[in-house]
Image (cartoon, helix red, strand yellow):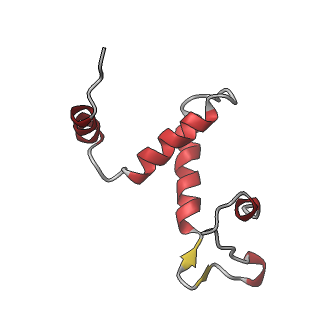
Amino acid sequence: SYDGLVEAGFKRHHRINHGKAQFARNGVHINGIESFWSYAKRRHQKFNGLRKTSFPVFLKETEFRFNTRDQNLYKLLLRSCRINPLRR
């Protein structure tokens, strides 16, 4: 299902062949992407659906939350606001 990623320009995408009982190859495995999609689906359920136009923003927010899930979100956002304050 991820074959289109290479054609879309994601050069770092590696294929794993489950049909040959392959789940990892040369340090490449599927756990990371499957973990992310599981996380994204759980977050998505809370919204009872999204508009198509909102999905890209939702996905970026989910990516940010997933990549910083071990950090204190409040402190991270506060630091960001200090560095880039809102201007009137």
Where residue 67 appears, as percent x and y from the top left, is 41, 53
Splitting the image into 4 quarters, where does residue 72 fall? top left
Where residue 28 appears, as percent x and y from the top left, is 56, 77
Which residue is drawn at the image coordinates 76% and 84% (left, top)? 20
Work out whether residue 66 or residue 82 is closer to the camera in this orientation and state it: 82
Which residue is drawn at the image coordinates 60% and 69% (left, top)? 12
Which image quarter is the C terminus in?
A: top left
The furthest residue to the top? 88
Where residue 19 appears, as percent x and y from the top left, is 78, 78
User: With respect to residue 78, does 41 lie above or below?
Assistant: below
Splitting the image into 4 quarters, where does residue 41 fall? top right
The furthest residue to the front? 88
Which image quarter is the N terminus in?
A: bottom right
Number of callouts: 0
Which residue is drawn at the image coordinates 37% and 50% (left, top)? 69
Where residue 33 appears, as percent x and y from the top left, is 57, 61
62 displayed left or right of 8? left
Splitting the image into 4 quarters, where does residue 25 fall? bottom right
Which residue is drawn at the image coordinates 57% and 74% (left, top)? 29
41 displayed left or right of 9? left
Work out whether residue 23 or residue 9 is closer to the camera in this orientation and state it: 9
User: With respect to residue 70, does 79 lie above or below?
Assistant: above
Work out whether residue 84 or residue 45 is closer to the camera in this orientation and state it: 84
User: With respect to residue 28, does 42 lie above or below?
Assistant: above
